[in-house]
Image (cartoon, rainbow, N blue to C red):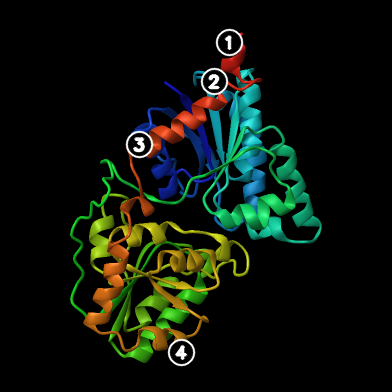
Amino acid sequence: MLHVLYLVHDVSDPAVRRRITMLRAGGAQVTLAGFRRTTNPIADVEGLRPLDLGATRDGRFGQRLAAVAKAALSIGSKLGGVPRPDLIIARNLEMLALARRARSAFGASVPIVYECLDIHRLVLRNDVLGKALRATERFLARDVKLLVTSSPAFIANYFKPFGQVAAPIELVENKYFEAAAILPGASERVESPVGPPWRIGWFGALRCRRSLELLADFSRRMDGRFEIVLRGRPALSEFPDFHGFVEAEPWLSFRGPYRNPEDMAAIYNDVHFSWAIDFFEAGQNSEWLLPNRLYEGCRFGAVPISMGNTETGRFLKQQDIGVLLPDASPEALEAALGKMEEHRFDRLKGRVLARNPRTWSYDRSDCRALVERLRSLTAMPGSFAAEALA
């Protein structure tokens, strides 16, 4: 069984839980180690007890850098009781630095995989800091065996033009994970509430102040014909007063966090549309990503709303589904959705449900293929497994 040491920047991130689930469904054994964004250590993630590397704070680059430096000194002792892994996966740049320290602690040429699912705005700056971070990434990634990323636009707009990583690239999209096999033509019945009011669901990592203000303005214009439902984890560092703002808006509601995958069907079946727009890093990461909510919403029949000039918008155009906005304004939203009626919504939703379910989901066969791809790295020259066989 392939033993993977998974180093992550936030052990409580739901996407970390999903990746662990995929690795284990594919036949891998996983050891989890990482930082946390909580006061106390996390006791359990998918039945695993994470090795705690300390606390970090969202949006505090200096504090995170100090935490990484501190963890680099202690990671050898933290991993003292861990059997030597076959492979190390480092999620994000700071964990790539720790992966090299971890490999040294094991005293073997354990292959390292670099998993990068967001391009942080700091590495795209054209000043001394940006250039230094890119140089650091190139140095740390000089001998990684594989780069895992989630959007073709990350490759086309960052990794290739800047020459950051020479390793082969594996595209693993942010798809929903299905425990059962996905059969061609399979489609379970997905019910939506009768509208109006029409509900737009914005779920997941809530970090975009501009989206919140735009949705609030639009809902007030519609005077109750549209409701905005927020669920997930708000990045409170990005909002002056998230909860106060939402409470003051008549047609917005925040209904707290949810469990993925346990709650996905229920929360998406409660809305008509899925907000697949992010202006958090406009012109850069926000235009290049293919977010979790795109796949999850479509998987459960919610009609996606996106900007037409983004990677998400281009993807939706190829699929011929969704509502694409020409600009980010209440007027554009009103023009696109304001006269929504049942017949038109049924057509929009029908096109989403008509797509091959594999467009939105991975199943166990995909997980096994991913683990086999990772296993092949352990047989490459320079890996511990290859040395053991020599």
Q: Mark 4 belongs to which amino acid?
A: Glu
Estimate the spatial distance between the alpha carbons at disc 2 and disc 4, rounded to whole Å. Answer: 59 Å
Q: Mark 3 belongs to which amino acid?
A: Ser
Q: Position of residue 303 (x, y in %)?
A: 33, 70
- Which one is in front in this view, the residue at disc 3 or the one at disc 1? 3
Task: Say which residue appears at 25% left-offset and 52% top-offset.
Answer: 185
Reading the image, the residue beneath label 4 is 331
Q: Position of residue 292 (x, y in %)?
A: 42, 56
Q: Secondary structure at mark 3?
A: helix
The residue closer to the viewer here, 204 or 322, is 322
Estimate the spatial distance between the alpha carbons at disc 1 and disc 2, rounded to whole Å. Answer: 21 Å
Q: Mark 2 belongs to which amino acid?
A: Gly
Q: Could you tell me which quadrant the C terminus lies in?
A: top right
Reading the image, the residue beneath label 1 is 388
N-terminal-most mark, 2 or 4 = 2
N-terminal-most mark, 4 or 3 = 4
Q: Residues within 10 Å of mark 2 (few under 14, many from 20)?
A: few
N-terminal-most mark, 1 or 2 = 2
**Image disc number at residue 365:** 3
The residue closer to the viewer here, 352 or 141, is 352
Can residue 190 be seen here? The reply is: yes
Horizontal arrangement in the rendering, residue 390 relative to residue 86 (left or right): right
The residue closer to the viewer here, 267 or 336, is 336
